[in-house]
Image (cartoon, helix red, strand yellow):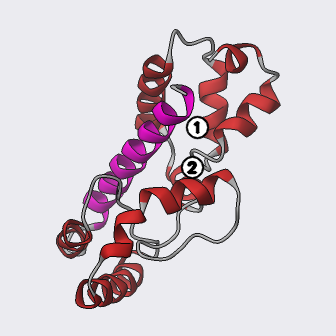
Amino acid sequence: MEWFATAPVDDAISALLPLCASTEWATALVERRPYADAVALADASDEVFAGLAETDLDAALSGHPRIGERMRGEGAAAQLSRSEQSAMQSADEQVAAQILQGNQDYEQRFDRVFLIRAAGRTPREILVELQRRIDNDDATERAEVREQLRQITRLRLEGHFQR
């Protein structure tokens, strides 16, 4: 937290972008510095998420692979994604196939990747949520995506800044 509080603006923004790919989100958090601790930073992130425009949410989504797909690359965002989705490696063939099909159906329906906080969820729980959410109307699903992004980002912030 000490480094983040005093880092040059561009460096601080760059440090946040692997946690959430929205430049608007990262810039807003950097502008609010300093923070007492990681929880205060995560609380500020929650506030910023509430006001992010749809285009900024789309930018944040760009940093997330499909559920069940391995994120390519070796950067911090790829490592976080692999860690968060590690439970998917234990999915049985049937659940994995249903998630794959569900991803395709979801993308056709909503024209974006299905996003869910995978950390702490089993493959079966992820599948149930995917099946439930595909019946959402557009506004309800946009709210769900915002909430899932908020949860993922909060976990990432707390993990990164509490080291």
Q: Secondary structure at mark 2?
A: helix
Three-letter amino acid code at the position of disc 2: Asp
Q: Is residue 150 magenta?
A: yes
Residue 113: x percent and y percent? 45, 71
Three-letter amino acid code at the position of disc 1: Trp
- Mark 1: few, some, or many residues within 10 Å (few <14, many ≥20)? many
Range covered by the magenta-colored residues: 138-161
Split into 4 quadrants, where in the image is the N terminus? top right
Residue named by callout 2: 56
Query: Circles 2 and 1: CB distance less than 8 Å?
Result: yes
| Residue 25, label in figure | 1
Q: Is residue 34 above or below residue 159?
A: above
At a point 61% along the width and 28% down the height, the residue shown is 28
Q: In front here: 154 or 143?
A: 154
At a point 34% along the width and 79% down the height, the residue shown is 106
Q: Is residue 117 above or below residue 19?
A: below
Q: Residue 26 lies in what quarter of the image?
A: top right
Residue 88: x percent and y percent? 36, 71
